[in-house]
């Protein structure tokens, strides 16, 4: 193979591969078009009991850490900020409208070691399980993965969300467990 043929192959690959990647991303967004976008935070979160800067890793279909959600500004990893108060959690990703996760849509919180595009030390990620709810009431369970700069911040966030879950669960509203 001569030098010009090799150069033509490399140039063709440099054009074709990004085009295929863009086509794949477009198809993923089209397949996920029925998944609702997250609720939007209309104003700054007031009386946040917890706030921190985090590395937003991904949001995936619940229980499927390799199935990234590509709709509603949740498709790309980035530095972000997270805040919680007694009503829910706000996730602010630069370049996207702040997402609002009401307490009643939070399903759980846990630790994780890996998700799409990221593997860390054991329990190095925080997994926030929640539901994307459409206006019709239909919901899609999702998992959002966050990487905190300090382990103490992760523990504080887990405690704040656990308190939110306990406050919004029907058993706590009735004053006991079933």
Image (cartoon, rainbow, N blue to C red):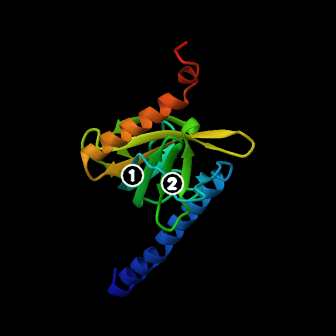
> Is residue 113 at all visible to an observer of this figure?
no
Q: Residue at x 44, y 42 (%)?
A: 65
Q: Which mark is residue 147?
A: none
* Outermost top residue: 178
The local secondary structure at tag 1 comes to strand
Q: Is the residue 145 above or below the residue 95 in the image?
A: above
Horizontal arrangement in the rendering, residue 50 relative to residue 68 (left or right): left
* Outermost bottom residue: 4
Instruction: Tell which of 15 and 124 is nearer to you.
Output: 124
Q: Residue at x 43, y 81 (%)?
A: 11
Location of the N terminus by quadrant is bottom left
Horizontal arrangement in the rendering, residue 75 relative to residue 57 (left or right): right
The local secondary structure at tag 2 comes to loop
Tell me the distance, in whole angstroms, between the alpha carbons under discs 2 and 1: 10 Å
The residue beneath circle 2 is: 45
Labels 2 & 1 near each other (Cβ < 8 A): yes
The residue beneath circle 1 is: 51
> Is residue 16 at all visible to an observer of this figure?
yes
Pinpoint residue 20: horizontal percent, then vertical percent.
Answer: 53, 66
Label located before the other in sequence (2 or 1): 2
Q: Quadrant of residue 66?
A: top left
Q: Residue at x 50, y 65 (%)?
A: 21
Pinpoint residue 173: horizontal percent, then vertical percent.
Answer: 57, 24
């Amino acid at each position: 193979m001569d030098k010009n043929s090799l150069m033509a192959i490399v140039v063709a690959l440099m054009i074709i591969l990004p085009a295929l990647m863009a086509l794949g991303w477009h198809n993923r967004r089209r397949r996920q078009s029925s998944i609702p976008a997250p609720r939007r935070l209309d104003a700054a979160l007031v009386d946040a009991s917890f706030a921190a800067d985090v590395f937003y890793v991904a949001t995936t279909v619940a229980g499927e850490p390799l199935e990234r959600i590509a709709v509603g500004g949740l498709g790309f990893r980035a530095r972000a900020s997270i805040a919680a108060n007694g009503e829910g959690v706000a996730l602010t990703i630069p370049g996207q409208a702040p997402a609002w996760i009401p307490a009643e849509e939070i399903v759980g919180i846990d630790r994780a070691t890996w998700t799409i595009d990221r593997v860390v030390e054991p329990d190095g990620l925080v997994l926030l399980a929640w539901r994307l709810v459409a206006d019709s009431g239909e919901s899609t369970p999702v998992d959002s993965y966050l990487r905190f700069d300090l382990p103490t911040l992760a523990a504080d966030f887990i405690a704040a969300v656990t308190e939110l879950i306990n406050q919004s669960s029907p058993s706590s509203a009735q004053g006991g467990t079933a």
